[in-house]
Image: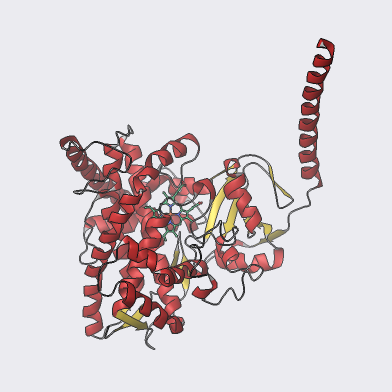
Amino acid sequence: RPVRKWLAKDRVTFGRQLALRLARLGRRWQLIASKRMPEASGDIRQIAGQPVFVPLYSLAQTYGPIFRLCFGPKRFVVVSDPAITRHLLASHAANYSKGILSEILDFVMGKGLIPADGEIWQTRRRAIVPSLHKRYIASMIGMFGRCNLKGLSLLEESAGAGQAVEMENYFSRLTLDIIGKAVFNYEFDSLRHEDPVIQAVYTVLREAEYRSTAFVPYWRLPLASSLVPRQQRCKEALKTINTTLDGLVAKCRRLVDQEDDEFEEEFLSQEDPSILHFLLASGDQISSKQLRDDLMTLLIAGHETTAAVLTWTVYCLVLNPQYMPRLQEEVDRVIGDGIPTLENVKELAFTTRVINEGMRMYPQPPVLIRRALKDDVLGGYEVKEGDDIFISVWNLHRSPRLWHQPDVFDPERFNVKGPIPNETTENYRYLPFGGGRRKCIGDQFALFEAVVSLAMLVRRFTFSIGPEAPPVSMTTGATIHTKQGLYVTLTKRSTP
Ligand code: HEM
C-alpha cells in the first residue's frame, strides 16, 4: 500500500510539472509564432497640429485593430479592439503601468491616483474609494443642483440680453465650482468671479495638457523652471495652489479635532461633507505631500472631464434637435423647476442615455495610455517590456465594425429600460470611464453631475448655434476641447 500511495503522489506531482512545462512551452511557441505587428511609420509633422486621436482613426482603418506607430525615435502600439482592451485593462492589468502619463503628470499630481502605480496606487485607492460612498453621492446631488441654479441665473441674463454664450467656458467654471466643494469644501465661485487661485488652477491644467501633446520635453532641462517664462508661471501657479490646499487641510484638521462624531463606514459631516474631511476623519496617516497629490488629482480628474462631456453633449443636441422634445418632456415630468434628488436622477433614464451617447461620440479622454512591464502577446503579436501603448477609446466608440452608424448621435441605441451602459454591458466596445482595476472612481458622481446639469439646463432653455458663431472643431489635450469655443444662443422656454 505505501508503494502504491507513493506512486500515486508522484504521478500527481509529475503530472503537475508536465502541465506547467507544456504551458510555458506553449507560451514560448505562441511568442515565436506570433506574426510581425503591422507597422505605420512616417514623419512626425504629418500628425502634428491635429488632435492625436484623429490620425489614429484613419490609421486603424488601414492597419487594423492593433499596429505599431513609428515616428522617428518614438514608437507606440495603438489598440482599437475590445478583446485586447479587456486584456490590457482587466485580465492582465497587473502587467501594465501608466508609463508616459506618470512622467507627464508628475509635476502636478506627484503620486496621486491617476499617475501612481504599484503599492502607492493600491494603498491610496483603498483609502480614497470608500469616501465616495452612497450617502456622500446622495448629498452631492443637492450641491450639484444649487451650483447649477447659480449658473442658470447667469445664463438667463445672457439669454435676456440676446447674447450667445460660450458653453465650454461655462461648463468648465460650473464643474470647477462643483469639484472644489466636493473634494475640499472650497468655494471657487468661478462662475461669478476671477481670482488668483482660479487663474492658477487653469494655468496648471493648460500646462498638463501642453506637456501631454508637446514633442520635446524641454521642461526637464535644468533651470527651465526659472528661465522659461511659461515654466515660471507654472511654478508660481503650483505655489499658489499648494498654499491654498495647505490652508484648507489645516482648517479641516481643526474641524476634525473639534468634532466628536465617531468615524464609521459611511462617515459624512453635515458641516463639511468633502472627501478631504472623510480622509482626515478616517485617521489616514499620510504625508502632507501625498494628501496634496491626492487632492490635486481629484480636482483635475473630476473637473474638465465632466465639463467636456457636457460641452460635447450639448453640441450633439444642437445638431440633433429631434431629441429635445423627449428630453424636455422627461425633465418637466420628473423634476420641473426643482433641484433633483437621487431618486429623480434615477428616473431620468432618457437624459442619462443622452449623456451616455454624448460620451460615446466624444470620450474623455479619447486615448488611454499604458506601458508593458513585461513581454506579452496582444492579439497574436508580441509586445516587449517597456513598449508604450495607446488604447484608442475614440476608435472603439466610433468603429463601424462594432457599431451601427457610429458617427450618428442616437441616444436610443442604448436601451432606455436596460442597465446603464458601461464596459461590462457593452463588452469593452464602450468604456467611458475605463475598466478593470484602474477604472474611474468618480464614475457615478460624474454621471449624476452631468445628468443634473443637463436636465436643469434643458428645463429652462432650448439652444441653437447662430450663423455668426465660429465653427466648432476639436483640439485636444487630456480631454477634447473646442478650437474656438461652443457659442450657443439660448432661448428661454415657457415651461409648463
Ligand atoms: C480614472 C473618465 C470624472 C476621478 C478615469 C479613467 C477614465 C475616467 C476613462 C481611467 C483612466 C485610465 O484607465 O487610464 C472620467 C470621465 C469623467 C470622470 C469621463 C466625467 C464625466 C471623475 C471624477 C472624479 C474622477 C468626478 C473624482 C471625483 C478619477 C480617478 C481616476 C480616474 C482618481 C484614477 C483611478 C485609478 O487609476 O485608480 N476617469 N472621469 N473622475 N478618475 Fe475619472
Residue 167, given in percent of the width and then of the height, sits at 34, 73
Left/right of residue 357 with respect to residue 83 in the rendered view:
left
Farthest top residue? 2
Residue 152, given in percent of the width and then of the height, sits at 25, 73
Left/right of residue 409 with respect to residue 465 in the rendered view:
right
Q: Could you tell me if residue 307 is visible in this image?
A: no
Placement of 461 over or under 291, stated as above or below: below
For the point 56% across and 59% down, which residue is it? 425
Farthest front residue? 1
For the point 43% across and 78% down, which residue is it? 317
Picture quadrant where residue 265 is located = top left
Placement of 76 over or under 375, stated as above or below: below
Placement of 166 over or under 4, stated as above or below: below
Q: Quadrant of the C terminus?
A: bottom left
For the point 59% across and 58% down, which residue is it? 428
Picture quadrant where residue 77 is located = bottom right
For the point 28% across and 84% down, which residue is it? 493
Q: Quadrant of the N terminus?
A: top right
Placement of 36 over or under 420, stated as above or below: above
